[in-house]
Amino acid sequence: MSDYLEQVFNGLSLGWILLLVALGLTFTFGQMRVINMAHGELIMAGAYTPYVLQTEIGLFAGAKGAAFVVALPLAFVVAGALGVLLERTLLSRMVNRPLDTLLVTFGVSLILQQAAKDRFGAPNADVVTPTWLRGNWDLLGFTMPHRRLFIMALGLVVIVGVWAFMAKLPQGRRMRAVMQNRDLASVSGLATRRVDAVTFFLGSGLAGVAGVAVSLIGSVGSQIGTDYVIDAFLVVIVGGLGTLRGAVIAAFALGMTNAFSEYFTTASLGKAIVFILVVAFLQFRPNGLVAFRTRGLAT
Amino acid sequence: MAKGRRFRGSIALALTVALAMAATACGDDDSEEGTGGSGDEGGDEPVKVGVLHSLSGTMSISEVAVHDAELLAIKEINEAGGVLGRQIEPVVEDGQSDWPTFAEKAEKLLTVDKVAAVFGGWTSASRKAMLPVFEGLDGLLFYPVQYEGLEASPNIFYTGATTNQQIIPALDYLKEQGLTKVYLVGSDYVFPRTANKEIKAYAEANGLEILGEDYLPLGETDTATLVSKVEAAAPDVVFNTLNGDTNVAFFKEFTAKGITPDEIQTISVSVAEEEVSGIGIDNIVGHLVAWNYYQTTDTPENVEFVEAFKAEYGEDRVVADPIEAGYNAVYIWAAAVEKAGSFEVDAVKEAAKGLELDTPEGPITVSDWNQHISKTARIGQINAEGLIDEVWASDGPIEPDPCLEDYPWAEGLAQGECDAAHAAAE
């Protein structure tokens, strides 16, 4: 019984990681229909932030834990800035040209990966886990590592923050307006280009925060972006493009499915099973879990 | 009017492209006719050798240091006068932890750079990818990492341990210590799968119980489910053949769940001093490893080697078994070349047979038929400084038996891989 509970915990833990990684993509892909292949590298930029703070900023030489905490908002800003730069210089010139954005962002991702290799060296870097995150909690017969609990808490804070932003703040409402019907929003007087920049900043910043979370689990290298970008796209597609609720449900569904199928079979087979189930699911609901229905001609 | 402008534009573009191609073609010709590769050209021209390791990707955590050691050996030999009076020029390539890339770069080193020998590889997957290249082009590969055995290519020298020099002594040790319930954990490629086949055959013949066998894709960092499975099975020991970054995630998760080596011990064959610094000492202290050499190994050659390595690359660098094996590989090749008086592959291979050398791991002898070397097996335990203390060693160097011919329980595993080597030796 406790084995199953443990797997539920592992599934939830994986789900939170998937959600953090995919949340940013929900905005850029879901709302702006921009296929950002460089999303993984934004995660990588976020993952390197605590490493830079811990090893290169003398201020934090003795306080790796403090460096880690500071890295969270900093990664948001760094990745967000990188994303906005990408959007303003390249993507804004390619509105409504999805194939072009795909190719361009793919190229940007390669450039960013090589830049990381040149800057940080090819071997992977290790982010030191803060002392207050080591150790674990024994509950209901199984152990929960503090790191994973922290990722869950972080995910919760992020999700609540994003929901509050979208529902309550005027910038969030503007984002929703542009997402639902761009032409109508623009005709109503919204500066759609500026809203796009804010959306991209938010989406990229969230990827950066996800990167910090990911640095707790394994080592940080120039290729970790490619490890996570496919899972991120999977969550967004299954969840239904652009919907927060869909992304949340999809992330946990995928996380649980992955954890349980890996438990009963093997890691490789577990991944294959998840993909097969996603393909089967998309046959029945091609618009994803939570589809966006409008009365307009543009969907 | 517009059509005319577009037409002229495309001609201009075509001309530019043609010019660019011509320019690069000219450039390439110059470099190919350049100074000598192998062959008995003699004289003062340097001799090129290839150094082919993963300098990026998941395996770079392990391989960059091996490449460093090989460059150090080349530098030392050059300072002592080179080999056959010629300086050695290393040509470094990055395998990028991608096996087809290893094969591609190996082919480039042999055909374009015309190197006399290549020092490279780590994963058995990279070696298997390079094997047909070296056999097809009759090149020479020096492979410095422990592996699963069951191979004896005429074009590869194996300076790392084969099964009977690492895995089998480790299993003997576990049996002696009474750790008989074993859980097998590995990365999903040829080395762990083959090694586990051998382990299961040994277990059946020697009374060890295999509680489970699980594989993770190379580069996988989510080890939560695997660690849960291991915990649930409650083995005495985990035999760990994971490679690359996955070890970082595995030991972090293992320790985060509060499992100590007293509850579940692990013994790893791909974790050495280099990987320990990537994993974090606190996450792995007290766990066992099985190798043939540690930084703490007590020989006069080792004292010199450690000093030289740290002087070249930094005081906080560590040395480990594959690093030392890479270093030895260059010296073995140089010694064989001196003895043969030539860089020709067949002459070097003949001269290497029975070659004896004093190395940091102790005195070694190159086999006279399978191009492996004799090695002492040593079991170690990771200490609080991140170095490894020897807790058991075999009585002197063990002769390499890559196809496990001396072990009745291993019958059928080799499937004739060593027949060619036996035939060539007669």
Image (cartoon, coloured by chain):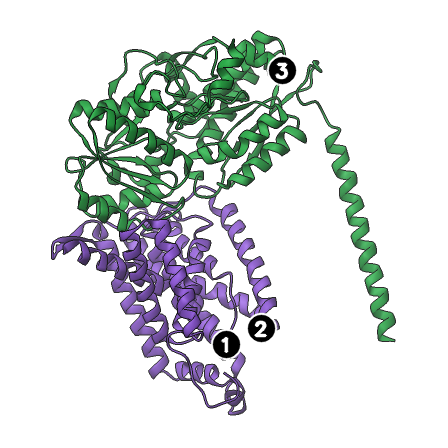
In the figure, the shade used to draw chain B is green
* x and y, in percent, of residue A1 in the image: 14, 56
For residue A92, which numbered disc appears in the image? 2
* Residue at (44, 31) in percent of width and height: B65
* x and y, in percent, of residue B195 in the image: 35, 31
Crowding at dot 1, Cα within 10 Å, few <14 / some 14-19 / many 20+, comes out as many
Which of label 2 and label 3 is nearer to you?
Answer: 3
Are the two marked residues, 1 and 3, in contact with CB atoms closer than 8 angstroms? no
* x and y, in percent, of residue A167 in the image: 34, 82
> Which amino acid, mark 3?
Phe
* Residue at (58, 67) in percent of width and height: A101
Nearest the camera: A62 or B236? B236
Indicate the secondary structure of the residue bearing disc 2.
Answer: helix
- As drawn, A252 above or below B85: below
The image quadrant that residue B12 belongs to is bottom right
| Chain rendered purple | A
The image quadrant that residue B408 belongs to is top left
C-alpha gap between disc 2 and disc 3: 59 Å
Crowding at dot 3, Cα within 10 Å, few <14 / some 14-19 / many 20+, comes out as many
* Residue at (52, 67) in percent of width and height: A35
Residue that mark 3 sits on? B343
Indicate the secondary structure of the residue bearing disc 1.
Answer: helix
Q: Is residue A269 visible?
A: yes
